[in-house]
Amino acid sequence: MVTYYDDKSVQVTSAAIWVDGRSFALAEITMVWHRQGSRSWRVLVGRGAIGAALAGPLVAAVLGIALAVWLHRSPTVTIAIVGASVLVGLAVGPVADFLFEHLDRSYAKGSRQLEIWARWRGQPVRLLCTGDALRFGQIYRAVQRAVEHSNPARPAGRR
């Protein structure tokens, strides 16, 4: 028996697909397809917040430099304002890696609910519903490979 995918709730093998304790024999699956749900506003707002957190100190630094030039104060005051503005701008450096990591992770997980469906014993059955795009892709490819290898004359279809 070949294992194509295995995690705590899903296992895809050359014999069957197990999802949350339910078993679906590959010999009884005739077609596999996927569906996407609508976008999650929560995820999109989170990405926007990360972008604002990255841009905030830089905007503050630019505004501080513009203020220093506009005020026409003594060179010492101007240098102090520009220096403080540059320090505020540099504040984004240490947190940028942390924020970019969260932004990258949000794109890997995706912003939609994704579903894997199969025609099992002649009936459409939802095998999986997840918001994790990376995991969805791994499981979907594993299911396709398993179905294709279980009966080469009957490739997995898409609807």
Image (tube, rainbow, N blue to C red):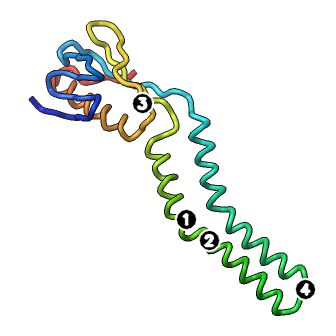
Left or right placement of residue 91 versus residue 110 in this view: right
Looking at the image, residue 158 lies above or below residue 85: above
Is residue 33 or residue 18 the one in the foreground?
Answer: 18
Disc 2 on helix, strand or loop? Answer: loop
The image quadrant where one finds the N terminus is: top left
Which three-letter amino acid code belongs to the residue tagged 4? Answer: His
Disc 4 on helix, strand or loop? Answer: loop
Name the N-terminal-most of marks 3 and 2.
Answer: 2
Name the N-terminal-most of marks 4 and 3.
Answer: 4
Q: Which residue is mark 1?
A: 95
Quarter-of-image position of residue 134: top left
Q: Which residue is mark 2?
A: 91
At x 32% / y 31%, what residue is drawn? 140
Q: CA distance from mark 2 to mark 4?
A: 26 Å
Which three-letter amino acid code belongs to the residue tagged 2? Answer: Ala
Q: Which mark is residue 72?
A: 4
At x 22% / y 31%, what residue is drawn? 145
Name the N-terminal-most of marks 2 and 4.
Answer: 4
Q: Are marks 1 and 2 in contact (CB under 8 Å)?
A: yes
Residue 30 at x, y percent in the picture: 26, 15
Q: Which mark is residue 130?
A: 3
Left or right placement of residue 57 versus residue 93 in this view: right
Residue 92 at x, y percent in the picture: 60, 68
Q: CA distance from mark 4 to mark 3?
A: 58 Å
Q: CA distance from mark 1 to mark 2?
A: 7 Å
Quarter-of-image position of residue 46: top right
